[in-house]
Image: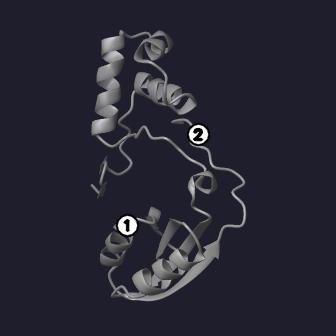
């Protein structure tokens, strides 16, 4: 069975209670175990164990989401990367860059898409020109500079 870094691809691993816990944390990442326990009908200790299991297995993360502009990052961009040959090496190298927030291997006109968060245009130019384009196997890139962040939400549920 195909796998990703979180387990077998396409295998449903969440029961209804775990889904409710995730949805509660998507609505309020600072919700207490006691508050979540009331929602899902478990003890506080059981919720704590489930949350820890969800974190340990990589099903979810609990993080502070910031507005990049408000914390000193004035330039965001999506970079489309075309690769000649094997994709894993370039994808791993791009993933290791500190400015890169998101990397996916895709089908279509680009082999890899990555989102970068930079302090300014000079840093973006360095990331694209000196780091990504210089990687073995990278044939070309196309940069889509963000002019305005219209929506960034993480409360899409567990469906």
Q: Is residue 149 left or right of residue 49?
A: right
The location of residue 82, given as percent across then percent down, is 47, 83
- Which colour style is shown? one colour
x, y percent for residue 45 = 30, 13
From the viewer's perspective, is 95 left or right of 65?
left
Above-or-below relation of 39 to 153: above
Of callouts 1 and 2, which one flags the residue occurring earlier in the amino acid sequence?
1
Q: Nearer the viewer, residue 80 or 115?
A: 115
Q: Which mark is residue 159?
A: none
Task: Say above or below: 3 vs 108.
Answer: above
Q: Quarter of the image for the C terminus: give it.
A: top right
Q: In this rendered view, identify the residue nearer to me: 99 or 26.
A: 99
The tally of labels here is 2
Q: Residue at x 39, y 32 (%)?
A: 14
* x 43%, y 86%: residue: 130
Separation (CA) of disc 1 from disc 2: 24 Å
Q: Residue drawn at (27%, 55%), measured in percent from left and top?
A: 1
Marks 1/2 in contact by CB < 8 Å: the verdict is no
Mark 2, secondary structure of its residue:
loop
Which mark's residue is nearer the viewer, 1 or 2?
1
What label does residue 95 carry, if any? 1
Q: Give the image quarter of residue 157.
A: top right
The image position of residue 135, as x and y in percent, is 36, 85
The quarter of the picture where residue 78 lies is: bottom right
Q: Name the residue nearer the viewer: 124 or 37.
A: 124
| Element under disc 1 | helix
Question: Which residue is painted at 62% across and 51% down in the image?
Answer: 70
Residue denoted by label 2: 156
Q: Residues within 10 Å of mark 1 (few under 14, many from 20)?
A: some
| Image side of residue 46 versus residue 123, left or right | left
């Amino acid at each position: 069975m195909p796998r990703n870094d979180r387990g077998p691809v396409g295998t449903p691993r969440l029961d209804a209670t775990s889904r409710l816990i995730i949805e509660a944390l998507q609505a309020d990442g600072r919700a207490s175990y006691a508050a979540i326990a009331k929602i899902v009908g478990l003890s506080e200790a059981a919720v704590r164990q489930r949350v820890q299991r969800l974190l340990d297995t990589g099903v979810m993360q609990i993080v502070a989401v910031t507005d990049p502009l408000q914390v000193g990052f004035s330039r965001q961009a999506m970079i489309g990367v075309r690769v000649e040959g094997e994709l894993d090496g370039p994808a791993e190298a791009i993933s290791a860059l500190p400015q890169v927030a998101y990397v996916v291997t895709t089908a279509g006109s680009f082999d890899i898409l990555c989102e970068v968060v930079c302090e300014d245009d000079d840093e973006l130019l360095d990331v694209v020109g000196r780091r990504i384009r210089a990687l073995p196997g990278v044939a070309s890139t196309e940069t889509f500079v963000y002019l305005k962040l219209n929506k960034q939400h993480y409360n899409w549920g567990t469906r």
